């Protein structure tokens, strides 16, 4: 399954690893913050509707 | 029906909500297909061996790192000229994405350079200007987060983006000049005619498409978040005032 | 005391608090060096340990004026010294907060920047070790300097001037450890001396800093 | 020339704090703004002085006619009293600081560094700056903070002379300024009802 | 306008005004370099032009936050922008005052420090010339950065982060002139480019700085 | 325990400004210092608070018993109202800030950044700090600057409660604090006659 990377295995795997890792962090952070903001906003909206 | 309608936050959120799933799915499919294809099903290059696989991440990331800044520049100009809030927030939302792409391009470049040039890093003009670009991203984001007033921050960062773009181009030429005739040899780049044969090029194209879509999806999502954050600040402020 | 530490850390990470800026400065300085001296790898790798040390020192230096000046400007330093905290405690906590927000990040990121300057392979370990041992001394000495200049508006540059000579021994031994390490030589002697300086400075200097702070607060 | 404020709304941090303000200050008259802490006096004065944009409504006859004095005095502690005043006189094209010095009895302090003055002395120096600007419309934010009774009287007499010479003044204060002929405007009734700005509306 | 220039110069030379501090910083940095990289003359003389340029740049950088921050803190900046001076005039005078107090002294003293770093003989002229042509650009760009960060308390480090990338072209061409000059090569092209950058920056950037200053002053 | 000040002389920049001061403040009482601008009230209070040495004479019963509030409020603009107060509460070993918040009606502002308060609101927060210190002797320099009438009354009632609980207060002011039962000391008669300091004598 795994392709033969030869003596460059580290370079290739590290590149893929680091890049995908960074992308994953970026995506997850964006999604998490979006979720949180959505929820927070809803809460605040509810509150402000009830009060005003 | 003008494009400026999307400058309305509500309209923007509604529209992007509708298209986001599609764009995200497209980004995911392109990235998976492109990377799997590139990683598992392409031959090694006769000169670079398996390192050519780094190409599929390195090039799209590098391209999008530059394009993200260009997009921020356009968005900043729109804010300065037409004062559409969504545009300023989109520029803000794009910065961390662009910065991450820059880091990815730098990191993959470094990993690639190790076997190819025998060094992680060389002061090659292209690499150097990328590092400078990264600094611009850092400064831009730092300025956004240092200023409280939203409109002031938008104004200042737009001007910074404008001035910064001019200086980024200047730096690019300065760096080219600086490292000319001093440091040859080590640099190596794939000669398109010869090496980027179709076997390498097709998966790369798919990956590029994936990165473009990913960028769009992330910017849409993050802009939505910024809009909501802004709205929340306005609501809380109004509550306090009452 | 803990309250003071927590407040300082919290202020540092708040927007505009300056956390991470020392780091960026370090990065930028490292980037500037090749622009100044030219891009030859051989030359760069020879000066790399020294550049990293000088860079860390300057990044530390630039954040010193935040230690007391902000508290002085808004009047809270006056209130702090009339509070039931010993001044020795105040200066120690301030130095610790400074190290946590400025020194520690530098130690962690230095090896990465070594890459940019083609630091020779054995150098990574020793640059990190020497910075880890040396930066606490920089923070403590810097706190002393900050206490000396606390009444002076925007005394940042004066502060640099006072502190730099005091930094010389730390710099010499620290850079020596890093340089020898990078060249694969024995680092034992300079490392011991560096450790000695750090230990001595941490044990004794806070008393001087506290005295200086009290004097500065006492004047009209 | 009158200062005319028409249907003005002023905002702080994007949120309106006062709205529906309409008033005018004719040459030779003074208007005193009153209102509890946080009611928006400072915000209003900054808007009139052009330091921040109006949220809604208009301010006419301000601009280049205004001399503004804020909560802080804008003194250089490393310059002497004379040097501080001379600088502002030059910036505003005047030259004579003798009048300003004598108005606020600063002659004995003329060669003192501004940083070595007491709180009230600093304030007197800050007020003396108004005289050297030669501008007709004074916009003052709590001008008598830290002043003793004698200095407040001094200040009142300078303002009266300024009004007599056809100048005008708009002042916010919590304490009595000793200028009974000044009209008083309580800003409390103009508290803005919670509402969004035009700009923020899209976000609300 | 002249009054503002005179006031700023006077403030700079008063005790604690910071005149000479940039200079001392420059001196100390130059002294530290041999401690950091080791004392070999050959190595030092090779990196000398670059070190002098980087030192000058940092010394300039460190005094940037005085340009507007002091006036902002004591409230006189607010009064200045309501005074009958155009903001373009204010930022230009501020940049000029900064250059006269920070840039010019560096230009004059750089050859002296060259001695400490065994700068090769032809280098003296070209280090001086390149600094003379380049430091005005540093002051003008720095004023832009200072105007950007004027509302931010102790924004010194943020200021550095914003300004340093903008300094890159100036530094590259300036150091290139100095280095080529020291090696006896032709300096015409980089010198022309450096001059071009300086001229362009001085002609155009004040408008951006003025806009930024007005925006910063406008906020509540 | 009483605050006893005996034959005190205080100096600014090496020059005595007040001398021959003798007074005491018993638990449950307040003393108000009055005097024209520049007469030396701030200098006296700083000396009593131990922030500068006495030029001559003695101050007894001060030290660790004092909570001092200066012209500036000592607030961190990047911390919220609650965070500011909590910090001081922890430093002084107390923990309860609820009382202080309600004393100065700061609850509605509790989550606001201190930097976003108006001048008077900042001052209220600065005064609330006194309550959380739990110290018996309050030394206050112009505490009611920028406060509106309602807030001055608030302040007066807090001081009264503090006195009622056996605390004491020493305050400098130019305006009426609304605490008629406080004794008043005019410092003007104690103006120091020009003379050299012991230290400087050798140079004269
Ligand atoms: C940290 C180091 C590096 C950085 C920052 C970097 C940056 C870039 C950039 C900006 C591009 C242009 C993308 C575009 O606009 O099309 C690029 C393309 C490329 N890079 Fe790198 N690079 C680095 C290291 C390397 C190394 C070590 C190699 C291979 C030995 C390499 C091979 C390539 C190739 C083959 C391309 C595509 C060229 C083309 O399409 O014309 N890069 N890189
Ligand atoms: N940056 C800010 N963001 C949000 N609200 C703010 C900001 N600055 C001030 N405020 C609020 O705006 C209101 C108006 O403040 P302003 O300073 O104009 O009041 P003021 O009438 O001058 O009060 P004072 O008499 O205490 O000086 C206050 O309630 C204050 O809390
Ligand atoms: N650093 C200094 N050097 C010399 N004299 C000074 C210095 N600082 C203040 N003074 C002078 O000392 C005197 C006392 O000042 P102080 O601040 O104690 O007065 P104050 O009674 O608090 O006045 P105010 O009511 O205006 O606050 C003043 O005349 C002042 O000019
Ligand atoms: Mg106010
Ligand atoms: Mg006083």
Image: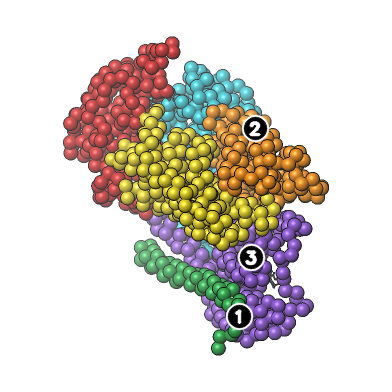
Chain colours: A green, B purple, C yellow, D cyan, E orange, F red
| Residue F133 appears in view | yes
Query: Can you give x and y, in whole percent of width and height, for residue D147 in the image?
Result: 41, 27
Residue depicted at x 45% and y 32%: D143
Q: Are marks 2 and 1 on the same chain?
A: no
> Which residue was labeled with disc 2?
E5
> Which residue was labeled with disc 3?
B119
Query: Can you give x and y, in whole percent of width and height, for residue C24 in the image?
Result: 55, 54
A23 or E27: nearer the viewer: E27
Mark nearer the viewer, 2 or 1: 1
Q: Which mark is residue A6?
A: 1
Q: Is mark 3 within 8 Å of ligand 1?
A: no
- Asked if A9 appears above or below D140 in the picture, the reply is below
SS label for mark 1: helix
- Find the distance from the CA under tag 2 to the CA under tag 1: 68 Å
Residue depicted at x 55% and y 64%: B96
Q: Is the C-beta separation of discs 1 and 3 under 8 Å?
A: no
- Which chain is home to disc 2? E
- Asked if A34 appears above or below C4 in the picture, the reply is below
Q: Residue furthest top?
A: F204
Residue depicted at x 46% and y 59%: B234
């Amino acid at each position: 399954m795994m392709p033969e990377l030869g003596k460059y295995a580290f370079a290739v795997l590290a590149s893929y690893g680091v890049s995908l890792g960074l992308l994953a962090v970026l995506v997850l952070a964006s999604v998490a913050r979006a979720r949180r903001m959505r929820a927070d906003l809803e809460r605040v909206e509810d509150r402000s509707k009830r009060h005003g | 029906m003008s494009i400026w309608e999307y400058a309305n936050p509500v309209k923007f959120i509604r529209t992007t909500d509708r298209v986001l799933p599609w764009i995200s799915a497209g980004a995911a499919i392109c990235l998976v297909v492109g990377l799997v294809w590139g990683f598992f099903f392409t031959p090694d290059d006769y000169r670079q061996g398996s390192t050519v696989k780094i190409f599929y991440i390195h090039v799209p990331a590098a391209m999008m790192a530059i394009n993200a800044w260009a997009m921020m520049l356009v968005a900043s100009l729109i804010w300065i000229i037409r004062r559409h809030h969504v545009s300023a927030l989109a520029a803000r939302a794009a910065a961390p994405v662009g910065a991450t792409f820059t880091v990815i391009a730098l990191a993959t470049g470094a990993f690639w350079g190790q076997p190819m040039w025998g060094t992680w890093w060389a002061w090659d003009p292209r690499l150097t200007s990328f590092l400078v670009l990264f600094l611009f991203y850092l400064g831009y984001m730092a300025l956004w987060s240092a200023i409280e007033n939203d409109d002031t921050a938008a104004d200042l960062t737009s001007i910074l983006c404008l001035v910064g773009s001019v200086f980024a181009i200047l730096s690019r030429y300065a760096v080219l000049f600086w490292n000319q005739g001093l440091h040859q040899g080590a640099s190596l780049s794939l000669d398109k005619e010869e090496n980027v044969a179709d076997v390498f090029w097709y998966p790369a194209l798919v990956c590029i498409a994936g990165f473009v879509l990913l960028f769009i999806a992330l910017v849409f999502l993050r802009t939505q978040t910024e809009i909501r954050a802004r709205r929340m600040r306005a609501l809380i402020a109004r509550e306090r005032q009452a | 005391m803990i309250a003071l530490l927590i407040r300082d850390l919290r202020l540092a990470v708040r927007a505009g608090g300056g956390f991470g800026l020392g780091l960026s400065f370090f990065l930028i300085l490292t980037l500037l060096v090749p622009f100044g001296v030219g891009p030859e790898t051989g030359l760069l790798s020879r000066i790399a340990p020294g550049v990293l040390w000088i860079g860390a020192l300057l990044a530390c230096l630039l954040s010193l004026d935040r230690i007391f000046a902000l508290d002085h400007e808004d009047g809270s330093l006056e209130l702090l010294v009339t509070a039931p905290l010993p001044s020795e405690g105040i200066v120690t906590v301030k130095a610790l907060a400074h190290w946590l927000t400025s020194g520690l990040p530098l130690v962690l990121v230095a090896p990465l920047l070594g890459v940019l300057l083609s630091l020779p392979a054995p150098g990574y370990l020793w640059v990190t070790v020497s910075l880890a041992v040396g930066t606490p001394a920089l923070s403590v000495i810097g706190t002393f300097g900050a206490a000396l200049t606390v009444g002076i508006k925007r005394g940042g540059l004066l502060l640099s001037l006072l502190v730099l000579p005091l930094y010389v021994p730390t710099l010499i031994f620290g850079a020596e450890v890093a340089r020898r390490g990078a060249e694969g030589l024995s680092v034992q002697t300079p490392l011991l001396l560096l450790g000695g300086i750090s230990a001595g400075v941490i044990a004794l200097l806070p008393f001087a800093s506290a005295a200086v702070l009290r004097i500065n607060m006492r004047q009209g | 020339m009158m200062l005319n404020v028409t249907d003005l709304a002023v905002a702080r941090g994007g949120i309106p704090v006062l709205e529906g303000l309409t008033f005018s200050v004719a040459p030779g008259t003074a208007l005193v703004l009153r209102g509890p802490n946080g009611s928006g006096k400072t915000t209003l004065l900054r808007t009139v002085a052009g330091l921040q944009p109006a949220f809604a409504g208009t301010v006419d006859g301000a601009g280049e006619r205004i001399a503004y004095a804020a909560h802080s005095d804008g003194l250089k502690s490393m310059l002497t009293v004379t040097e501080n005043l001379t600088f502002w006189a030059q910036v505003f094209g005047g030259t004579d600081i003798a009048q300003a010095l004598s108005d606020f009895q600063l002659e004995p302090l003329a060669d003192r560094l501004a940083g070595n003055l007491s709180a009230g002395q600093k304030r007197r120096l800050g007020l003396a700056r108004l005289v050297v600007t030669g501008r007709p419309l004074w916009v003052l934010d709590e001008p008598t903070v830290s002043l003793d009774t004698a200095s407040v009287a001094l200040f009142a007499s300078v303002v009266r002379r300024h009004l007599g010479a056809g100048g005008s003044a708009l002042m916010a204060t919590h304490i009595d300024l000793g200028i009974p002929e000044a009209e008083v405007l309580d800003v409390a009734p103009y508290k803005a009802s919670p509402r969004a700005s035009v700009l923020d509306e899209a976000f609300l």
